[in-house]
């Protein structure tokens, strides 16, 4: 970060915000006659079944039917400010909401933008029989243009904007991520049991949640499976289990998507097990460092926390600078210091920044909470640092936040002075596709609840990108940098739909950090069949995930240096695809400490990716905080005010 003075502004004063009118509904509502044509058969079927217990029992075997205790989806166009009031008025239990959009048609369109996409809000409820009877009664009154009764008037607006009402069925529970992951696992190890995550509908009543868990456990037992771990995080309405079943049961679901687990009404979705951890390229070339230019000295309490792997605390650049809190003894899972790669490099970058830029060590301890251990991604394969495979990672993260900022089991918080948290982690099994992940919801809650700045790496996408306009690799390689830049950017933009953010980087209250094409390594050639794709240092690396976040928010918010990442071709002639060079080697990257071999404590390496960029952002955030602490306590602008 450049050394520049802080510009002190006058003290702000607070004013009461101006009263504004509530947002105007811009999507036209439909008449009762038109809604009767569209939705009447669904309500008629429900109306006929409710008085007849036998008929109702028959409908329970039909996953497309609306019945008591089955999650119900209200698809409501536009923005209704009173839907929750409407639900409460008839006793519907709210269990979640989501967003979607549809193309404008003859029924639903924005009044002043008739060709624009129409926003749709999805409200999830679980009704009992009385609530369904109330709903049918209100629908009948709406159809006959009769008053809906005291406290029920808001249902008129709901019915006018109701695009659909339907049960949550098997096709909703089985995510595309799960299907893709299961096919991959069955192909690699067709006889090995498969672990997956099950998210339940969150019920306010704890006893009801326990019944859900008991029922799910019994169902798994009947399938020859077991529950590995369960967790509830009430502030974000999260209730889930990590489960394992024989591969044959997964194959059965893939062959028949309306049997087994996908038919359980208590289940919201089935997802692949999260793979959160060390996903950045790494270097194996050792470069020795000289002795530290500045000793650690007397450091203040931590303001930055790193949730990552276990770092090598005795490295020359980290000695006496870390406060490691490892209540789960994850350090004991490391076979050798050489496995402590990710935590060591991230801690080095947060404490010192890019070691190629000179000493800029922060003046505070760095709080480190290990959340990863070395594991084999495939049996007999390379060990990488990942969150434990026998527990839900989001629960581990939640407990880490609580222990650090609030304390657990009646004990004091372990690092209450922390105000910046670095998460150089991403879920390789979940790319953002419009629905916010529980991980992102947790980060949003923690950032708001504890007034904490959380920096999250956007994630790395290693997928190949086709270059349809390139017939010959040699011509592309020898083209001027500006020409290569245009070619690559055009291709990346054309494939943006497959290069989405990795969860949890879609979080709204966090800062998402991407990696830009920048470092301090002198030009010294290129890897085999590789070339630098850009002329500008300010463009995102090919591997850096990009895209719109929740509610079409721009993500990532910031780009930090992630190495001048080169791209490698798959062929010398068309069709040509390029992919990021996975290991910086000596050609590019950001220098950081690395665990030494044979007991060495003075080695470094070049690293690249969004994890690196997020760690550099955390380093700069710490230095900015230190500068702010040096500002005088008194107001230097006497008599001046700054009004918001």
Image (tube, rainbow, N blue to C red):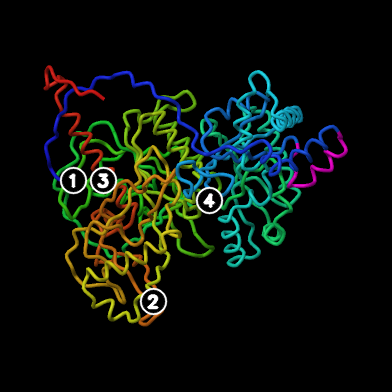
Could you say whether the residue bearing mark 2 is in a helix, strand or loop? loop
Q: Is residue 391 left or right of residue 633?
A: right
Measured as percent of width and height from the top left, residue 55 is found at 86, 39
Residues drawn in magenta = 52-67
Could you say whether the residue bearing mark 4 is in a helix, strand or loop? loop
Depth check, front residue: 533 or 111: 111
Residue of label 1: 1
Cα separation between marks 2 and 4: 35 Å
Give the mark toward the camera: 1 or 4: 4
Q: Earlier in the sequence, mark 2 or mark 4?
A: 4
Residue 61 is one of the magenta-drawn residues: yes
Residue at figure coordinates x 23%, y 76% from the top left:
479
Give the mark toward the camera: 2 or 1: 2
Residue of label 2: 576
Residue 328 in sight in this render: no
Residue at figure coordinates x 39%, y 40% from the top left:
369
Give the quadrant of residue 594: bottom left
Tag 2–tag 3 contact (CB < 8 Å): no
Depth check, front residue: 453 or 538: 538
Give the mark toward the camera: 4 or 3: 4
Cα separation between marks 2 and 1: 38 Å
Residue 121 is one of the magenta-drawn residues: no
Cα separation between marks 1 and 3: 20 Å
Q: Is residue 283 left or right of residue 63?
A: left
Q: Which mark is residue 318?
A: 3
Tag 4–tag 3 contact (CB < 8 Å): no
Residue at figure coordinates x 54%, y 38% from the top left:
28
Measured as percent of width and height from the top left, residue 86 is found at 61, 27
Depth check, front residue: 362 or 79: 79
Residue at figure coordinates x 51%, y 35% from the top left:
79
Residue of label 4: 103
Disc 1 crowd rating (10 Å Cα; few below 14, some 14-19, many 20+) is few
């Amino acid at each position: 970060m450049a050394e520049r003075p802080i510009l002190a502004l006058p003290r702000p004063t607070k004013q009461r915000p101006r009263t504004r009118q509530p947002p105007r509904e811009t999507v036209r509502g439909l008449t009762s006659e038109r809604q009767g044509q569209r939705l009447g058969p669904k309500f008629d079927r429900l109306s006929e079944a409710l008085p007849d217990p036998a008929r109702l029992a028959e409908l329970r075997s039909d996953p497309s039917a609306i019945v008591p205790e089955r999650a119900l989806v209200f698809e409501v166009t536009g923005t209704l400010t009173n839907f929750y009031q409407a639900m409460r008025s008839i006793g519907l239990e709210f269990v979640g909401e989501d967003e979607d959009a549809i193309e404008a048609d003859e029924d639903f369109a924005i009044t002043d933008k008739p060709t624009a996409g129409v926003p749709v809000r999805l409200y999830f409820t679980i009704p009992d029989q009385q609530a369904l009877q109330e709903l049918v009664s209100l629908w009948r009154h709406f159809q006959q243009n009769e008053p809906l009764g005291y406290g029920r008037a808001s249902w008129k607006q709901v019915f006018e904007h109701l695009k659909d009402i339907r049960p949550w069925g098997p096709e909703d529970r089985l995510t595309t991520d799960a299907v893709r992951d299961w096919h991959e696992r069955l192909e690699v190890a067709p006889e090995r049991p498969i672990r997956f995550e099950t998210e339940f509908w969150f019920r306010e009543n704890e006893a009801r949640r326990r019944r859900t868990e008991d029922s799910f456990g019994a169902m798994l037992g009947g399938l020859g499976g077991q529950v590995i771990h369960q967790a509830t995080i009430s502030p974000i309405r999260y209730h889930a289990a990590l489960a394992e079943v024989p591969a044959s049961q997964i194959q059965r679901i893939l062959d028949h998507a309306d049997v087994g687990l996908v038919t359980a009404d208590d289940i919201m979705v089935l997802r692949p097990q999260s793979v959160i951890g060390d996903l950045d390229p790494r270097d194996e070339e050792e470069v020795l460092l000289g002795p530290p230019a500045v000793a650690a000295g007397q450091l203040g309490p931590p303001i930055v926390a790193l949730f990552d792997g276990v770092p090598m605390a005795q490295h020359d650049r980290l000695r006496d600078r870390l406060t490691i809190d490892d209540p789960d003894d994850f350090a004991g899972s490391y076979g050798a210091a050489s496995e402590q790669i990710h935590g060591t490099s991230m801690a080095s970058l947060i404490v010192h920044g890019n070691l190629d830029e000179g000493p800029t060590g922060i003046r505070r301890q760095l709080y480190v909470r290990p959340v990863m251990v070395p594991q084999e991604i495939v049996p007999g394969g390379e060990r990488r640092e990942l969150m434990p495979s026998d527990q839900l990672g989001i629960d581990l993260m939640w407990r880490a936040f609580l222990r650090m900022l609030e304390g657990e089991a009646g004990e004091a918080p372990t690092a209450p002075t922390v105000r910046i948290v670095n998460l150089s982690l991403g879920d390789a099994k979940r790319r953002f596709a419009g629905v916010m992940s529980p991980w992102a919801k947790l980060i949003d809650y923690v950032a708001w609840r504890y007034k904490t700045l959380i920096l999250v790496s956007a994630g790395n996408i290693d997928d190949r990108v086709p270059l349809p306009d390139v017939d010959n690799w040699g011509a592309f390689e020898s083209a001027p940098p500006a020409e290569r830049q245009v070619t690559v950017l055009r291709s990346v933009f054309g494939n943006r739909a497959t290069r989405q953010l990795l969860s949890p980087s879609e979080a709204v209250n966090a800062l998402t950090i991407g990696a830009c094409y920048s470092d301090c390594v002198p030009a010294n050639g290129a890897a085999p069949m590789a070339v630098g794709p850009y002329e500008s240092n300010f463009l995102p690396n090919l591997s850096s995930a990009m895209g719109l976040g929740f509610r079409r928010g721009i993500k990532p918010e910031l780009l930090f240096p992630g190495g001048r990442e080169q791209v490698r071709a798959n062929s010398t002639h068309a069709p040509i695809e390029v992919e990021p060079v996975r290991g910086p080697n000596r050609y590019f990257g950001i220098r950081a400490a690395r665990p030494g071999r044979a007991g060495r404590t003075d080695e470094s390496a070049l690293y690249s990716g969004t994890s690196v960029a997020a760690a550099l952002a955390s380093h700069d955030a710490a230095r900015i905080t230190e500068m702010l602490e040096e500002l005088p306590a008194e107001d230097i602008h006497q008599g001046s005010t700054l009004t918001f």
